[in-house]
Image (spheres, helix red, strand yellow):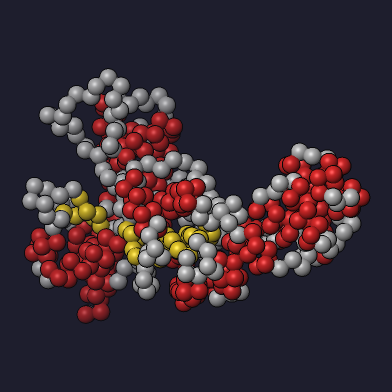
């Protein structure tokens, strides 16, 4: 940043702060003991290197919070960012991103996550699961709760390969500086030293959203944790990471509603919600209502929507994208497509990730990342009716039970296999997600064909 650009930035920050405070230059001079002429020169960009004491007097007079004070000091050319941030670091300076929507159906997961983050001994946690299942949204809610309840500073960093770097004009803002240091951990850049300098000895939460793209981060992350004894790190990832001390929290899709109302079910009372206790159904009905307000939640509509939830496995992003196709299809047509070709309706023009990839491509990549043994087993399991146990699958597929158990465990961590409600015998029953069933069968078939070609 050039010296003139820094001066212009300081002038802009000071004018904005004074207007935010709602006072004139003359009033600011009277409150701060800084002369009107000095204030005018600062706001017109005539002063290149103001004294820190002058800035402190002005900030005190305007009753600026930590974030605005830090922004004012960082706008001065040559101001050491780590020193400024170390003095101002706190909850106000480091808030998490505010969620744009309410969280639906994750009460227990949120309680478990915030409970672990509130303990002294759990300092590295990873929420892992299928693309589109809601990992980022859950992390946002947990971070916001800790920030508002416990006044914990939250450093939020998008670690995806396509995350945009701060604009040149914003590189001296408090949030951009903190985010930049956190993202530089991936390359072992100077951000490690800067973060240690600012956070050391203080309680803070670092959220690395999308850890998958930066496998080289682990040694720098461990050094940061060892240097900052009160820092906690929360990661969201599509693949489980083998990091020392890491506690994995698999995030499954939303629980599925009953597809048919039991004959002995009590009749709902007047005004009672048809979706009470059914988060996937509640969420899907909200998407349907936004796209097709003419579709009233009658018993018939609710039953059809429940079946669509099953066909899309209760994956929030899949359900949101599918609902957009109601602009073109009827509810019954959407159900048929969801059951036969779900990947055809899980993308729309508005729901890509930062790289522009749709959910279908992300799910395909999740299956492609499996090794040969996992690919074969997932393909075989896809041919079984939902509700199998590990022992049953081993018997049907003629595979050792220990092998099936190990690989099913790995597939569940990746979100490709889900646990179903226990039957009367309380045995663990499982099913392959409908979203990846055909993908898994196709990949397994292709692998078998390659093996045959190698033999011949």
Residue closest to the eye, 210 or 161: 210
Identified at 40% across, 36% down, the residue is: 287
25 to the left or right of 340: right
List x then y, in percent, for residue 7: 82, 59
Residue closest to the eye, 7 or 373: 7
Q: Is residue 24 above or below residue 231?
A: above
List x then y, in percent, for residue 181: 59, 67
Residue closest to the eye, 441 or 233: 233
Identified at 41% across, 43% down, the residue is: 103
Identified at 21% across, 80% down, the residue is: 455
Identified at 22% across, 75% down, the residue is: 452
373 to the left or right of 355: left
401 to the left or right of 450: left
Which image quadrant for residue 383?
bottom left
386 to the left or right of 211: left
List x then y, in percent, for residue 14: 78, 50
Q: Is residue 136 above or below residue 80?
A: above
Which image quadrant for residue 403?
bottom left
Quadrant (top left, top right, bottom left, bottom right) of the N terminus: bottom right
Residue at far bottom of view: 455
Residue closest to the eye, 383 or 408: 408
Which image quadrant for residue 191?
bottom right
């Amino acid at each position: 940043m050039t010296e003139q650009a820094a001066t212009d930035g300081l002038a802009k920050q000071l004018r904005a702060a004074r207007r935010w405070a709602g006072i004139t230059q003359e009033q600011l001079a009277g409150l701060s003991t800084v002369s009107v002429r000095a204030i005018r020169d600062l706001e017109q960009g005539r002063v290149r290197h103001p004294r820190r004491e002058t800035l402190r007097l002005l900030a005190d007079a305007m009753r600026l919070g930590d974030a605005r004070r830090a922004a004012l000091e960082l706008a001065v050319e040559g101001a050491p960012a780590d020193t400024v941030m170390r003095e101002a670091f706190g909850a106000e300076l480091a808030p998490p991103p505010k969620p744009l929507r309410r969280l639906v159906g994750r009460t227990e997961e949120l309680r478990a996550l915030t409970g672990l983050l509130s303990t002294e001994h759990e300092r590295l946690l990873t929420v892992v699961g299928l693309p589109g299942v809601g990992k980022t949204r859950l992390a946002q809610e947990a971070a916001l709760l800790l920030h508002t309840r416990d006044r914990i500073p939250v450093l939020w960093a998008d670690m995806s390969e396509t995350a945009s770097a701060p604009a040149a004009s914003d590189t001296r803002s408090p949030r951009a500086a903190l985010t930049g240091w956190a993202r530089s951990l991936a390359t072992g850049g100077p951000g490690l030293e800067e973060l240690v300098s600012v956070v050391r000895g203080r309680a803070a939460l670092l959220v690395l959203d999308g850890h998958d793209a930066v496998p080289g981060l682990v040694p720098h992350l461990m050094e940061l944790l060892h240097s900052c004894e009160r820092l906690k790190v929360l990661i969201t990832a599509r693949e489980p990471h083998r990091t020392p001390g890491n506690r994995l929290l698999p995030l499954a899709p939303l629980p599925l509603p009953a597809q048919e109302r039991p004959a002995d079910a009590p009749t709902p009372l007047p005004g009672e919600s048809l979706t009470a206790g059914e988060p996937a159904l509640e969420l899907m009905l909200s998407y349907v209502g936004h796209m097709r307000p003419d579709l009233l939640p009658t018993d018939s509509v609710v039953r059809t929507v429940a079946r669509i939830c099953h066909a899309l496995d209760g994956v929030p992003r899949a359900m949101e994208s599918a609902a957009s196709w109601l602009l073109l299809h009827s509810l019954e047509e959407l159900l048929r497509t969801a059951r036969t070709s779900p990947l055809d309706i899980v993308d729309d023009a508005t729901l890509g990730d930062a790289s522009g990839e749709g959910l279908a491509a992300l799910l395909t990549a999740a299956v492609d990342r499996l090794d040969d043994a996992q690919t074969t087993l997932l393909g075989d399991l896809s041919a079984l009716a939902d509700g199998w146990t590990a022992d049953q699958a081993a018997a049907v597929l003629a595979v050792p039970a220990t092998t099936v158990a190990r690989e099913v465990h790995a597939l569940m961590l990746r979100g490709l296999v889900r646990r179903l409600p226990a039957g009367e015998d309380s045995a663990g029953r499982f099913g392959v997600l409908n979203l990846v069933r055909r993908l898994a069968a196709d990949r397994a078939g292709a692998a078998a064909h390659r093996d045959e070609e190698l033999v011949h």
